[in-house]
Amino acid sequence: MMDKDKLRKADIFSGSLIFLTGLFIVSQSLKMPMKDSWGGVQNVWFVSPAIFPLFVGAIIMLLGGMLIRTAVKEVGIKALKTLSSFILSRDFLQFLKLEKNLRFYAVVFILFSFVFLFIPRVDFFLAAIEFLLVFITMFYLNDRTMLVKLFLFYAAQVLIFILFLITGLNTFFSVYANYPGDWLVLSYILSFAVYVYQLTKDNPEFKKKYRISLIIAVISPLLVGMIFKYLLLVPMPFEGMLVELLDLVWYM
Amino acid sequence: MVLLFERLGSFFDIVLGLATHPESLAILFGSVLLGIIFGAMPGLTSTLGVALLTALTYSMDTNLAMVCLLSIYVGGTYGGSYASILINIPGTAASAATALDGYPLACKGEGGRAIGLTTTASAIGTIISMLFVVSISPIISRFALQFTSFEFFLLAFFGILISGTLTSPDLVIKGWIAGFLGLFLACIGRDQLQFYPRFTYGFAELESGIEVVPVLIGAFGIPQIIGVLKDKVHIGKAKELQRILPEFGTVLKNIPAIVRSALIGVGIGSVPGIGEDIAGWVSYGTAKNTSKHPETFGKGELQGVIASETANNACVGGAMIPLLNLGIPGSPPAAMLLGALMLHGVTPGPMITFEHPTFILEVAAILLLASVAMWITGMVLAKQVVKVLKIPTQIFMPIIGMLCIIGSYSLGLNIFNLYLMLPVGIICYFLTEMGYPIAPLVIGVILGPMADENIRRALMVSQGSFMPVFTRPVSLILFLIIVWTIASQLPWYKRKIAQLKQSFFKKK
């Protein structure tokens, strides 16, 4: 959590967002049937589906307004001006480049790409190996330069995958081979592994950490995935070439 | 009297049944151990443990699932003390107060003694809270049967307000905002009375409302992962452990402190949405204030460690009381348990004694066995469990991320759950950073349907009149408590009270 002064400044923004959320809820609720007929039933205001969201939205608006008032009262309008000039200054860019912020972008980017890009389209085991390999090495090596390099490498992989989907290459290659997305991610895993090896080979501590990361990144998804798939009988979000292979072995 | 003996008889039958069932025993000990490991690792909490196991226990029989989830809850709450005592980093928020005296004790070479005593005190605390679950539940259940829709609406509203008031680390308004945001999330989907689609915008996946468990996993798991990895948590070297088994005399000498702390834990646990962390701090504060030597607290006082650890474990049973009898979770892990129970087709509330007559006794029996299992595991495996403190957070956090994702997906086999879980998690991270508590939001999501359905049903019966709130005694009491809760946070009320106090003392 931030310190009190920063919190109050942030409260002006969060309070405004919350007020707008409340306003949005109220405006949407007003579109719901209040006294009209719905599903053949004539409504009265107190059974309307709008009544509860209206109440919730109004209270959120009120609380958001109160939060803005408290924050402005404590830090004053002057602080708001200082804050806006900070946002427009170069210092803000420096702030965005702070290591802890870089770490934040990396975590969010990895999570989003895994959930929205890879999980629905790539074999779960392969996607999870790629996810863990990138995630663990990026943070376990615990070095800013490494973090930036690995992040950029992974971002390039994600970009290529998006282009692969947008340009229709996925459909094009599926004529020649099953699961073209899986092959691409497999190549990502291998290329990432080679890239990290190249980066860490001269530093014994990094080398050791990389070895551990690699082992865990491969073993954990296999272990967890197999528990879910074969013991709990949960079908994977996308079953591709590795699941096919594991099925073959499991049901042999 | 006969009824009491009958109840005791069925309770011991259930205990015996569970204790002689190999599968239950294996799950009991396994989950307690897993819970201790989860609690011991800084960054992992018992709530997250319960959340992740909910997915794994989905296909299990309800009783076995409860054994698993309650055991990890009990183990996780206790496990936090390991990191607090040995490395001065609380394994969970619940054991933050333990670090104040636990670490100085470990520095003096008494880490093993402290762990032995906290293990015993935690087990006794859980058992005392279990006694409350058994004895108070029938009374609350019978009382709650008199509740009508107005009371249920006010109760849900009170739950959100009190949780927001007490868990907010910054302004109380923020706790209330979090609660109401949770209520808004609960509005999404078709409403339960007229099936009108609200805030669905044509998404078929939102028609049935948002899935509670993935939202809970996101709300508790994702901010934890981001927070730990962003802020580079450095873990120091753990202190060595010596003899763990506590001396009988020391335990006996501390029994009054243990009982007092357990009562505080049960009381705080039974308040909706208030977790083990608050119980630990309140109990620690009380122990310090009532001690003859308060100056020794913070320098390695055994009573300080006992106070916080007994209370946080007693909170587990306390949290079960409103959960089982009113359907209102007493703590964040209890909110997860509620989600898990719903998945298994068990709806906690006043009707639970009719729909599942032995359920409360089963929960109490599991609590008893879990506390015994926790004691045995703590005594036998403490030295081994401590080794998990050596695992770097950068390794287990990504694995937790993967478990959150596969766990959310497996509940309903729906990728949309993931699309919901991740943004909710990110929003919750920002909310946490800006001083908004997450517990009221979660309680809001859970209690939203109850509040919505009951207020409309109540108004339907009263033909749009709010008068029953004032004519029904329970409603009126709840209404007055809500008004007082809100008013007590307003500046003019605080000023008025201060003025009244001043004039009263002047007269004297």
Image (tube, coloured by chain):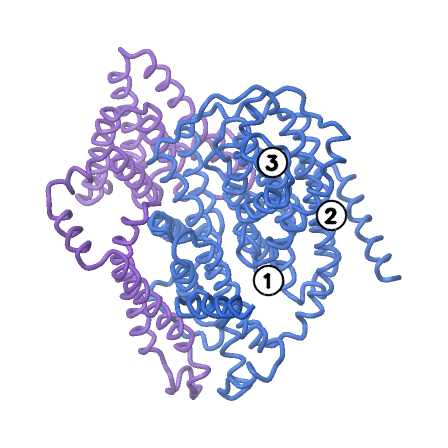
Chain colours: A purple, B blue
Between B272 and B18, the residue placed more toward the observer is B272
Determine the secondary structure under disc 2.
helix
Q: Mark 3 points at which residue?
A: B305
Residue at point 61% right, 38% down? B75
Nearer the N terminus, badge 1 or badge 3?
Answer: 3
Nearer the N terminus, badge 1 or badge 2?
Answer: 1
Label 1 is placed on what type of residue? Gly
For residue A216, which quarter of the picture?
top left
CA–CA distance in space, label 1 to label 2: 20 Å
From this viewpoint, is residue A9 visible?
A: yes
Q: Are marks 2 and 3 in contact (CB under 8 Å)?
A: no
From this viewpoint, is residue B157 visible?
A: no
Between A165 and B497, the residue placed more toward the observer is B497
CA–CA distance in space, label 1 to label 3: 32 Å
Between A4 and A174, the residue placed more toward the observer is A4
Q: Name the residue under label 1.
A: B327
Q: Tag 2: Cα neighbours inside 10 Å, few (<14), some, or many (≥20)?
A: many
Q: Same subunit under labels 1 and 3?
A: yes
Label 3 is placed on what type of residue? Val
Q: Which chain carries label 3?
A: B
Q: Position of residue B78 (x, y in %)?
A: 60, 38
Name the quarter where the C terminus of chain B is drawn: bottom right
Q: Nearer the viewer, mark 1 or mark 3?
A: 3
Determine the secondary structure under disc 3.
helix
Determine the secondary structure under disc 1.
loop
Left or right: B439 as drawn, with respect to A67: right
Q: Name the residue under label 2.
A: B365
- Could you tell me how many numbered marks the image carries? 3
Name the quarter where the N terminus of chain B is drawn: bottom right
Label 2 is placed on what type of residue? Ala
Left or right: A30 as drawn, with respect to B178: left
